[in-house]
Structure formats: C-alpha cells, structure tokens
Amino acid sequence: MMGITPEWRQRFERPPHLLGTLFWLHGTESEAESRHTFDLAVAQGIGEMTFESRPHWDYLGPKWWADLMLLLDWCREAGVSAYLFDEKWYPSGVAGNTIQKLDPAFRRSSLRLQYVRYRGPLARISLMPPWTQHSRSAIVSVSAYPETDEGIDYARRVDLTDRLQRRDSPHMHGIVHGVQWDVPPGDWIVCFVVEDRADNYIDPLHPEAVGAFIERVYESSKTQLGAYFGEPDSRLFL
C-alpha cells in the first residue's frame, strides 16, 4: 500500500486556497466570532468568499458596511478574493425590498386577460368586471368580439371601455358598477384586460426604477467600498 507523499501531506496540512464559500452575515456576530469563523475557513483552504446578505438585519445600512469593511480588511491580509451579491435576495432589483416602495409606478407591472362568453341577442345585460384593487390593479380595456366557425373575429371588435363606471372593481363593485351592453345576435366573447402591479418586485422596464436600484446598490457600494476594488491580491467583485 502506497504511503502519502510529503507533497500530498502538505496539501492536507496546508490546503491551497482553491475553494470558495458563502460567508453568512447576520449583523449580530461579535468581531471575535466573525474572526474565528474567518480563520477556520481560510485554514481549510478557502480562497474565495461571497458575503451572504440575506440574513443581515441592516442590509445597506451602517452596520452592513462596517461588517463588510472589517471582513474585507481580513481578506486583504489573507489574500482571499471577496465577492458581493448585488441584492439581499434573488432576484436583483429591489435593494432589500426598498425600491418598489419609493414610487407606486416602480412596482412590477403585468397584464392579465379575463373573458366571458355570451350568446345573443340579449338585452341590457350587466357585465361584471374582474376583481381589482385601486393602486394595485386597474382595468385597461373591455372589448367584445364575435365568434364564428373560423374562430374569433378580431376585426369586428366592439369597444366597451367607455362604459366602465370605474377602472377598479373591489368586492361587490363588480355587481354595482357592471358594464351595460346589449348583446347582438350570435356568439360573443367579452375580454377584460387588467394591469396588475405587485409590490414584491420592480418594473424592470421602468428606467427610473432601475436607476434607483443602481444608485442604491452599485453606487453606494462604490462609495463605501471603492478602496477595496481592483486590488491585485484581494479581488472584490459585485
């Protein structure tokens, strides 16, 4: 049985810094606790650290920057490469759930289609709009299309949008504020297009929302940590 060569023994005793790891930051660790964890990681061959932001209670606040600068100083001393996520959690864009709260227009926007079918002629029916909530969603349009054996005839669209009494339709208002219409003869499909805005993400097509994210994360990281970027022995990647 072959023994362990001196070269391999040295690799086990002093592992080369070829591994990477997530270094979790909570903001509650003492400096001594963080240093102990850091030294253990380096001693086991860790040469790259990504500072994990998800559990930190003061993300992008003074405590966050103070913790990072302390660790980056240690990385500089040990020749360890450092990496930062550009967000508190996935996906990037909200800067720790703050950007979409700056302006309702920054909230994620999406469209949904709801429809109902009728067979005419029917006089004075009341079309019940889909449920919506002011500031979070609104009815964009209401259209009726005749259906034939070949499918929906989009060229003969009947625009009912101007018959909406209100663009939002909270509970019961769909009954009270229905869209009045006389259904012509034949089969018809009535389509409601609704814009929804969710406060769990930004609208990535909104230039000011994206600009606010860049300012909040990238520019603040440059301001606070710019001295650590580009060092030959200790790289910082955002």
Image (cartoon, rainbow, N blue to C red):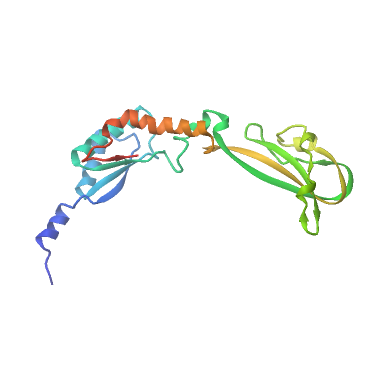
Instruction: Pick whichever, 215 or 170, lies toward us.
Output: 215
What is the residue that sits farthest to the left in this orientation?
6
Toward which corner of the image does residue 161 lie, by quadrant?
top right
Where does residue 177 sit, x and y in percent of width and height? 79, 34
Up-down: is 55 above or below 104? below
Residue shown at the point (71%, 46%) measured from the top left: 114
| Residue 20 seen from this side | yes
State the residue lying farthest toward the bottom.
Answer: 1
Tell me: 234 left or right of 174: left
Quadrant location of residue 54?
top left
- Residue sitting farthest toward the front: 155
Q: Residue at x 74, y 32 (%)?
A: 166
Rendering coords of residue 71 (x, y %): 26, 36
Location of residue 9 with respect to 91 vertically, above or below: below
Give the side of residue 146 with respect to residue 215, left or right: right
Report the side of 64 relative to 4 (left or right). right
State which quarter of the image contains the C terminus: top left
Which quarter shows the N terminus? bottom left
Q: Is residue 58 visible?
A: no
| Residue 76 coordinates in the image, percent (x, y) | 21, 37
Q: Position of residue 6 (x, y in %)?
A: 9, 60
